Amino acid sequence: MASTKIKINKHLDLSRLPKHIAIIMDGNGRWATRRGLPRNLGHKAGCENLKRIIQHIYDLGIKYATFFTFSTENWKRPKEEIDGIFNVVRQYLDDDGSQFVERDAKVIVSGDFTKLPNDLVESIKRIVDKTKNCKKFVLNLAINYGGRDEILMGVNKAISAGKPIDNAEEFSKLLYSKDLPDPDFIIRTSGEMRVSNFMLWQLAYSEFYFTNTYWPAFSEKDLQKALIEFQKRKRRFGSL
Ligand code: FPP
């Protein structure tokens, strides 16, 4: 989490920001290919951008942020690319460990991270444990995450407990996101207009924002522009 100084757009109302913002960081590969670079350099650039954007979300005072880092479907990619993604994630967690604690920022993970390589599992456990008492900010990394798998996990927990679930709030407590509010705002970069198995249960009333910008190029200014758009939406949650 490197520190940034950036102007706040005069159209952005800092008193009406989402509580929880979730981002599908898409377009790393195309960003690199456009520049004649290997795809893994796109993931490295994506990671650098993740640091900038997390810092900015934190500086704006948004408390919860979720980033789609590795999906249950990403295992279909070549091993070299998968290893490259895991390496940047591991380096990020190892290098930024003390900065999270300094900023009172808690790191949690959504997804079955136990299926990841041992060194990454160790890095995840270390950062989660180190930051478990932090309170100001929550960074939720969706790693080896799939929305359908998460719902199945909840259903199986309910079956094991042997009693029916009475309402949606109760079911939410069986999911990875049990301690987070649902995301108010979901951003997907790179021009794709899909949900891709992301937070399927939690997105029931989320506002969506799609931009053509590839993730490594999505700047703090772009984030503010998206947030201004969020503030124009009329959220009715099913009422009039
Ligand atoms: C999608 O772009 C991106 C991913 C599958 C990986 C996202 C991972 C990072 C940004 C690494 C940093 C993460 C952390 C938590 C340190 P794509 O490869 O699908 O792009 P394409 O659609 O252009 O091929």
Image (cartoon, rainbow, N blue to C red):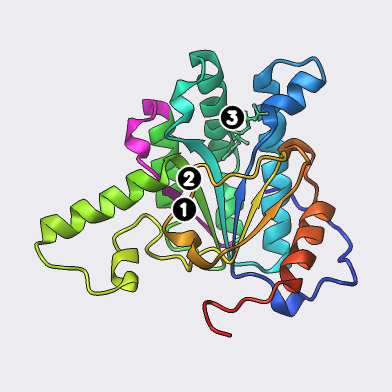
**How far apart are the two marked residues, 2 and 3, measured between alpha carbons?**
15 Å
Report the residue marked by disc 2. Answer: 142
In the figure, 173 relative to 107: above or below? Answer: below
Toward the viewer: 41 or 98? 41
- Give coordinates of residue 61: x percent, y percent: 68, 69
Quadrant position of the C terminus in the picture: bottom right
Mark 3 residue element: helix
Report the residue marked by disc 3. Answer: 88
Tags 2 and 1 touching, CB below 8 Å:
yes
Spot the residue most to the left. 162
Report the residue marked by disc 1. Answer: 199
Q: Residues within 10 Å of mark 2 (few under 14, many from 20)?
A: many
Amino acid marked by disc 1:
Met
Question: Can residue 75 be found in the magenta stretch?
Answer: no
Please state the extent of the stretch shown in magenta in the rendering. 104-119
- Give coordinates of residue 13: x percent, y percent: 79, 76
Q: Is mark 3 within 8 Å of ligand 1?
A: yes
Amino acid marked by disc 3:
Val
**How far apart are the two marked residues, 2 and 1, measured between alpha carbons?**
9 Å
Choose the circle earlier in sequence order: 2 or 1. Answer: 2
**How far apart are the two marked residues, 3 and 1, measured between alpha carbons?**
23 Å
